[in-house]
Amino acid sequence: MTLPSYALRPATVADAALIQCQRDAMFTEMGQDPARLAQVHAVGATWLRGALGRGLYTGVLAEAGAEVVAGAGVLWQDLPPNVDTSLTVRAYILNVYVQPEHRGRKLARRLVEHLLAECGARGVRLVSLHASDAGRSTYAALGFMPTNELRLVLPGEGAA
């Protein structure tokens, strides 16, 4: 059996809907309710178009032939300096997704390595992400370590 070769390319504004579909698939596989995800699909795609257009979000997509089969992105965050970095830009990796039939070929690792190289090229030293159970070992192998982050979702507008 011949494995497909994969080409990486930058995501463009035109890819926003595709990235949102990958994001929906990722959260569905992690157990989120597809009906609730459908409620935020359009606003998510709109946000991605704007973030890609403004350079707030940088994405990379993997193609097998003409088909996009995986993707990942980085959100550039404006935050104050801390003990780990004097820079005010941090990177938050998100939307790492590989179609099921293309898994097991280290595509997620390749995508994240590409984004980490972009972080390095920009001088960004502090990179974070949230990992699914399935992705945790990939991120640990790349040097990511657990932190003490907590989360609270307040009730009200926008609460899903």
Image (spheres, rainbow, N blue to C red):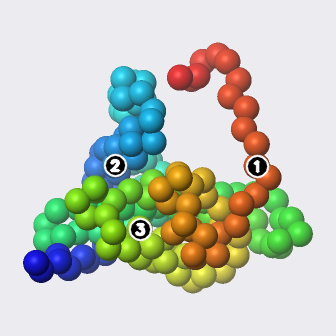
Residue 38, compared with residue 44, is above or below; it is above
Secondary structure beneath disc 3? helix
Q: How many marks?
A: 3
Q: Residue at x 76, y 65 (%)?
A: 88
Snapshot quadrant of residue 102: bottom left
Relative placement, left or right, of 125 versus 53 is right
Snapshot quadrant of residue 155: top right
The earlier-in-sequence mark between 1 and 3 is 3
The earlier-in-sequence mark between 2 and 1 is 2
- Residue 149's disc number: 1
Q: CA distance from mark 2 to mark 1?
A: 25 Å
Q: Which residue is mark 2?
A: 22
Q: Residue at x 50, y 60 (%)?
A: 135
Residue at the outermost top position: 156
Q: Quadrant of the N terminus?
A: bottom left
What amino acid is at disc 3? Ala
- Whether the residues at callouts 3 and 2 have beta carbons within 8 Å, the answer is no
Q: Residue at x 83, y 71 (%)?
A: 84
Residue at the outermost front position: 1
- Residue 158's disc number: none
The earlier-in-sequence mark between 3 and 2 is 2
- Closer to the camera in the image, 102 or 87: 102
In the image, residue 78 lies at what x, y percent?
70, 58
Q: Which residue is mark 3?
A: 108
What amino acid is at disc 1? Glu
Secondary structure beneath disc 2? helix
Q: Tell me if residue 45 can be seen.
A: no
Q: CA distance from mark 1 to mark 3?
A: 23 Å
- Whether the residues at callouts 1 and 3 have beta carbons within 8 Å, the answer is no
Assess disc 1: are there few (<14), some (14-19) or many (≥20) residues with their C-alpha within 10 Å of its C-alpha. few
